[in-house]
């Protein structure tokens, strides 16, 4: 269930910058996700399928938290929302570069740019294009 929730969250955060993603987690943790902000769990059919697919894991979470028995829709939301805080760091780390990684990437780009300036090597230029494409996607440019 943890991987399924993570994939749903990754889909929801597509196109978000880091501040927006952190705000999404804060809102999910403080105000619930049942307001329609999770596209994969908008309809009862979706929440009921989620509850069926992960029934045993949700029951374990309910027991862990001392939750009372509930209907499938509520079980789905309980299971989803219980995992959101546990996934925050993993999801943010997967989407965004850390400060150290950003610094490493900038240093690598500068190094390749300097090489590209001194050599007219097509291989270096291709490496530069690949790295810049990765940076753009990581920075959501």
Image: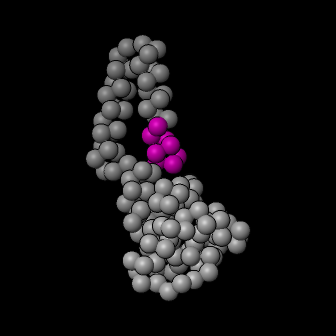
Residue at (45, 21) in percent of width and height: 125
Residue 36 seen from this side: yes
Q: How many marks?
A: 0
Q: How is the image coloured?
A: one colour
Relative depth, front residue between 24 and 9: 9
Relative depth, front residue between 69 and 15: 69
Q: Is residue 45 above or below residue 114?
A: below
Residue at (39, 56) in percent of width and height: 90
Residue at (56, 76) in percent of width and height: 75
Residue 24 seen from this side: no
Q: Return the x and y of residue 66 as percentages of the image width and height.
A: 42, 84
Toward the bottom, the furthest residue is: 68
| Drawn side of residue 46 relative to residue 100, left or right | right
Q: Return the x and y of residue 135 as percentages of the image width and height.
A: 44, 40
Residue at (39, 66) in percent of width and height: 86
Q: Is residue 99 above or below residue 5?
A: above
Q: Return the x and y of residue 8 as percentages of the image width and height.
A: 56, 59
The answer to if 100 sits in the magenta stretch is no
Residue 60 occupies quadrant: bottom left
Residue stretch rendered in magenta on the structure: 134-141
Most frequent secondary structure within the magenta stretch: helix
Relative depth, front residue between 125 and 90: 90
Q: Return the x and y of residue 49 as percentages of the image width and height.
A: 65, 65
């Amino acid at each position: 269930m943890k991987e399924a929730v993570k994939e749903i969250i990754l889909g929801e955060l597509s196109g978000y910058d880091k501040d927006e993603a952190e705000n999404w987690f804060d809102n999910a943790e403080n105000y619930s996700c049942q307001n329609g902000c999770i596209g994969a769990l908008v309809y009862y059919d979706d929440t009921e399928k989620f509850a069926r697919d992960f029934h045993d894991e949700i029951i374990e979470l309910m027991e862990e938290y001392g939750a009372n028995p509930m209907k499938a829709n509520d079980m789905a939301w309980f299971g989803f929302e219980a995992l959101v805080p546990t996934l925050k760091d993993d999801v943010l780390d997967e989407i965004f570069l850390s400060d150290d990684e950003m610094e490493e990437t900038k240093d690598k780009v500068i190094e390749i740019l300097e090489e590209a300036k001194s050599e007219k090597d097509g291989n270096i230029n291709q490496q530069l294009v690949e790295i810049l494409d990765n940076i753009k996607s990581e920075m959501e440019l």
